[in-house]
Structures are given as structure tokens and as C-alpha cells.
Amino acid sequence: MNADRQPVRTLRTPRAAQIVAAARDLLEERGRDELTMRALAESLGIRAPSLYKHFRNKEAVEAALTEDGLAEMGAALYAALRKAPEVERVPALLAAYRRHALAHQGLYRLATTGTLPRAALPDGLEEWAGTPFYLATEDPHRAQALWSYAHGMVVLELDGRYPDGSDLDLTWQAGALAFKNR
């Protein structure tokens, strides 16, 4: 697979794309628990049964959102790597990961927590979205460790789990330094 070439995404009708956009707005504004078919229909000014013409259930809507989340995160990470000199790939990757996750918190949580709906995602999307970690570390196990570090840091930051006064920029820098290629 060409690492920079994103896998073919699911084709959506204009109405399905509108539904996914409205679902994303709800997800970002209210959180995953408040993303229901009824709330989604209300936000679109339609009745809930009309949604089922485009998505078989809430899980299908969430899978579409997860697809978007992985594709957008992957694109952000590849862009960061393209701009970074080789010796700065890990810090650039971590900075892009953090920036993107914090800017899209609901989508980030949906795409990265709980069971991943792999069967509902385009072939190769998960691997493609994660490949920047391998490109930055050049080792599959270090790549998984780096993603685990980044994901844990983001979740702890989103949940407000760091003590007041923590300099998270310095914590991220320390993590980047620990994972830099030697």
C-alpha cells in the first residue's frame, strides 16, 4: 500500500453525507451518549424512521463517523510527517495527533475507544491511518507503543486527569524525546 494514498472511502449519497455531518455536530456538541437516532432526526428536522432509509441503525452512523475520524487523523499525521525533517518526525507526529484529537474530541473518542467496527470500515483504512506511527519509528512495536502513549496522553488530557499546573507541553516533549529514533 502506498502510505500516502488513502484507501477508497465509502461513497455516500448527498443525504447520507448530510446525516453524517449532523451526527458529527451532535457528537461534538453533546457527546456520544446523546447521539441517538431521535436526536439526529430532530436536528435534521425529520422523523427518526426517515434515517433508516440511509443507515440501518445507530451503529452504522457511528461507523461512518469512525471512518471519517480515522481518515482525517491519518491525513493530519501524514501531512505532519511530510513537513518534518527526519529527526523531528516523532515530535511532529505527536504534536499533530494531539492538536487533531483536541480539536475533534467527540470524533476522536468515538474512533479510538471501545470496539472498532472493522467490518464496517473500508479495507485498509485502519492500517493506513496508523502507518504514520511506523514511519516515524521504523519499528512496528515502537509504533504501537508510540500510539499507545499518544492515545493515553490525549485521553488523560481530555478527562482533566492531570494535576492543575501540569505543563503538558513539556510532558509531550518528554514523550517525543523518549521515542525518537536513536
Image (tube, grey):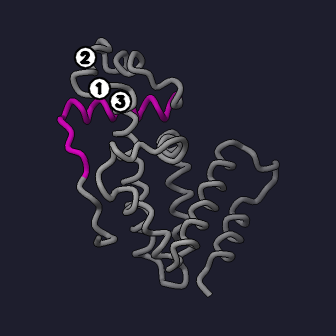
Q: Going by the image, does 110 lie left or right of 78?
A: right
In the image, farthest residue toward the bottom: 182
Q: Which residue is mark 1?
A: 56
Confirm whether the magenta stretch covers residue 18.
Answer: yes
Image location (x, y in percent) of residue 174: 71, 71
Please give the residue where the numbered disc 2 appears in the rendered image. Answer: 50
Residue 166 coordinates in the image, percent (x, y): 79, 56
Q: Is residue 63 magenta?
A: no
Give me the residue at 28% from left, 14% from top. 49
Instruction: Measuring from the top left, give residue 22's x and y in whole percent.
Output: 35, 30
Point out the tag, 2 or 1, that comes first from the N-terminus. Answer: 2
* C-alpha distance separating marks 2 and 3: 14 Å
Labelled disc at residue 22:
3
- Disc 2 on helix, strand or loop? helix
In the rendered image, the vertical position of residue 16 relative to residue 83, given as above or below: above
Task: Identify which residue, 31 or 181, lies in the foreground.
Answer: 181
Sequence-wise, the earlier of marks 2 and 3 is 3
Taking 17 as reference, is 82 left or right? right
- What's drawn in magenta, residue-wise? 9-30
